[in-house]
Image: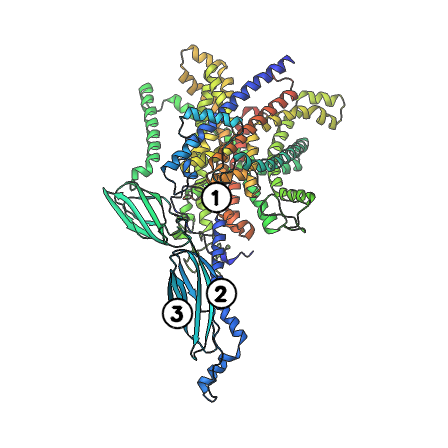
Amino acid sequence: MVNMRAFLARKTVYVLITFVIIITFNFFLFRIMPGDPTRVLVPKTGDQELIDAIKAHFGLDLPLWEQYLIYLKQTFTLDWGISTGVRKYADVTDVMAPAVMNTVVLLGTGTVLAILLGVSVGKFAAWRRGTASDAVAMSASLTFYSMPTFLFALFLLMIFAGWLKWFPIKGSEGWLPFVGQADIDTLGEKLLSRMYHLVLPLTAFTLEIMAEFALIMRNSLTDVLTEDYIVTARAKGLSNKEILNNHAMRNALLPVVTVMAISIGWVLGGTIMVEMVFSYDGLGLMTWDAVLEQDYSLLQALFLLMAVAVLIANVIADIIYVYLDPRVKL
Amino acid sequence: MPYPVSFQIMPEKRPETHKGMKKPAAVSITTMILALLALIVVGLLPAISPMAAADIAPEAPTLDAAGASTSALVALQDSDPPVAEAGANRTYYEGAIVTLNGSASSDDVGVVNYTWTFQDNGTLQTLEGETVQYVFWTPGTFNVSLNVTDAEGHWALDSAIYTILEDNEPPDIKCGNRTVDVGTVVDLNATRSTDNARIVNFTWTFEYDGEEIVLYGMVVLFQFNRTGMYEVTLVVTDASGLSSNTTVSVQVNKEPTWLGENWLKITIIALITLAIGRFILVKLRKDKTLFTSSDKEKIGLQWKSFKKTWKIFRANRIGMTGFTALCVFVVVAIFAPLLSTVQNPNHPDNAEPVILVDNWVNPLPPSLTPSPYTDLLHPLGTDHKGGDIYSLTLHGTRASLYVGLVATAISALMGAVIGLGAGYFGRAMDEVLMRATDFFLVLPWFPLMIVMMAILGREFVWVIVVIGITSWPSTARIVRSQVLTVKERQFIERARAIGAGDGHIISKHIMPNVMPLIFANTVLLISLAIFSESFLSFFGLGDPTVVSWGGMLEGAYQFGAFYKGAWWYILPPGLCILAMVLSFSLVGYALDDVLNPKLRRR
């Protein structure tokens, strides 16, 4: 696998370059903003001396390139500054840490569920293409796909939390039906409460992401099923199930992987919207808070984190693609 | 579903120049309710105490009254002394106005004299009256005693301890920056400033027309007749002499001129006119007439192929559904002022009053009876500010279509130029442009949009620009791959052989072959742009002065319509966003089917 090694080496170099560009972009994006960052930190009664002292303390009086170098160093040592709004004067890393966990749970579970569901629905529709069930599955998928995620989440919130009152309106933990707010003590109850709060956000997120996979899966499987080698397989006397699972699916999954790589940014957008609507304490809600509070240092860290996450996910998708399709030129 | 009546009280209007993002309105509503509750409790306190006293001796006052009026009975001797009640012990900061309230004292006949005595600064202070006000200027503990005397000379004593703390905190100033047009009277308002004791002085100082202007007062009015940026220094002093200051900037803009408001339109129209003029000039110089017979033939052929495409498109039922819906939306957007019942529905002057009585409350459910306040009909109800949902929804169509079309035009242009450049010129240019495209593809465009909007500020132009420049990479990739295949075709080589330049080849041979694909992709991008616009508005990053569906949903979300059952506030904008995004997607997919030769064969 000399080829593979060369491919990985090339990929690593590419990722590193992109990574540096992202960091630089992130630095300058927040430098062009109007306003003085010291204004948030200095109390209104503060005089010029205090402002100068704070500027010197944070290195804001240094030339831009020196600030950039310091920024680079601190980015790699995970020293991302202090939050100026959401939790005043707390370390940005400390502020973000609990939210990361929540988002990873929502995003991870949701994506896995969406891929499984989407691929199954697409497979189902492609196999029965032209029938009523195909039409129903596809129009439902198209509607979900076109529906803005936040809108779908809002509808779910209105029906299941506002009207039927089955699920909580906001939050990510702290309440359970029949148990109440105060009595959640045991680990089991805490977990249950978290899962209970996760139901609506997860449903909204999964259905939205699933739709795209279902549409792509159906399209690509319909294409593959018209290929000659499927006819050959049928002529060999293989059963429908064998043709579908062993011959058609492997090829048909390729576009799904491509789409997955492209739509990772989109998936992340989905989490932001869902978290915001359900006030689920994750990175998305934190982004919103940071925007509202004009907490630029937190916003900068959040943006960097998301960009790097998307970059890494893209690389993983690329590698999966190479394993799935041996024809790919390395 | 009912919702609490207290929600009729609205949070105060955001100052127009508030640059930051909107805070959840729920916070201010809650504080207002809390303040209201506190007011009610404070108001009830004195009322409750006498009632309790009356419970203890319910007979006495009636007896007295009867005795006085009928005089059949001998007037009873009032032998009971009064009950003095000096109030609870309290803590204040120095300089605060302290109200000594003895109204909770009671007597069966009536208290005739209240005397408050205490030592302040070594002198004995004696104040008379049921409620008196006094300012303690020195910190310390004061034992205030109240002597209550009734008509018969009976008296009672009670005392309360007032602790006066030293005031070390300067006042907290709340006053926002202003942006106004020239010639308007600006009200500089610091009413929201607070202090733990009491604010005694507001001084506004600024330089205007070479003179130093000093104004005093919590709210001052000043007419700015000169444009410019004025730094107004506001000094707020509290009773103990501590002061804090802040600088408020007043930006006085020129009166918006016709040119200033319409420069974008004028530029666009001028550019289009120039392009047409140049086309006609070139044509006349080359062919001597505007229409040659070959032109006629060309148009005829194009018309024929268009009719053929239209026929295929018409057969696509899904595409036609979307197309019909789009036509409806376009008609609604154009004739929105004619169709709506309220003109300029976002303006507070056109809304129902916010505090209402009887059964008329905001948000009002759909109703066919006109409002008793404004005589307006609200077929889809009102929002929590009293705006007409029906008219707002109709006007929202404009914002969505406008953003969708203009932002997509920007992104399609950028994508086409970059894709053409990369695909046609190849080599280093391809490498650089495609790396940039890859970079922007990898950037999560959702957070990117949010961050850019947060930095640029809530303006409609920025919404369009931000959506436009975050969605071009996919177009660039499609265009590049298409250009790469077209470039290798023989007719390009032939054109080059007879001496055609790059510009000619791109505009005459490559563009016509690439355009259909961009077109289908563009229509899909429009739906994405509309989606993004509604999301940004919902996120609280849209322009608050422009009516948009996302903005309406934001209002509904902040107000809490989702769990208060105000469905009429959510469904019209929500379903409209859904319908418009869906119809653009449907048309896009149908066009892709029709125009993409690879798909058409299927």
Is the image coloured rainbow, by chain, by secondary structure, or in one colour? rainbow
Identity, as a three-letter code, of the amino acid under mark 3: Gly
Amino acid type, mark 2? Leu
Q: Quadrant of the N terminus of chain A?
A: top right
**For mark 3, what is the residue?**
B129
Q: Position of residue B89 (x, y in %)?
A: 48, 62
The residue positioned 47% from the left and 19% from the top of the image is B432
Residue B307 percent coordinates (x, y): 48, 30
Between B466 and B448, the one nearer to me in the picture:
B448
Residue at label 1?
B549
Q: Secondary structure at mark 3?
A: loop
Judge the density around disc 3: few (<14), some (14-19), many (≥20) Cα neighbours within 10 Å: some
Task: Give the numbered dot on residue B45.
Answer: 2
Chain letter for mark 3, please.
Answer: B
Residue ID at (49%, 62%) = B41
Q: Tell me which label, 2 or 3, sits earlier in the chain.
A: 2
* Depicted B233 relative to depicted B476: above or below: below
Furthest residue in direction left, as rendered? B210
* Crowdedness near tag 1: few (<14), some (14–19) or many (≥20) residues, C-alpha within 10 Å: many
The chain containing the residue under callout 2 comes to B
What's the chain of the residue with tag 1? B
Furthest-top residue in this view: B497
Residue B360, image x, y percentages? 47, 59
The percent position of residue B590, horizontal first and vertical second, equals 54, 32
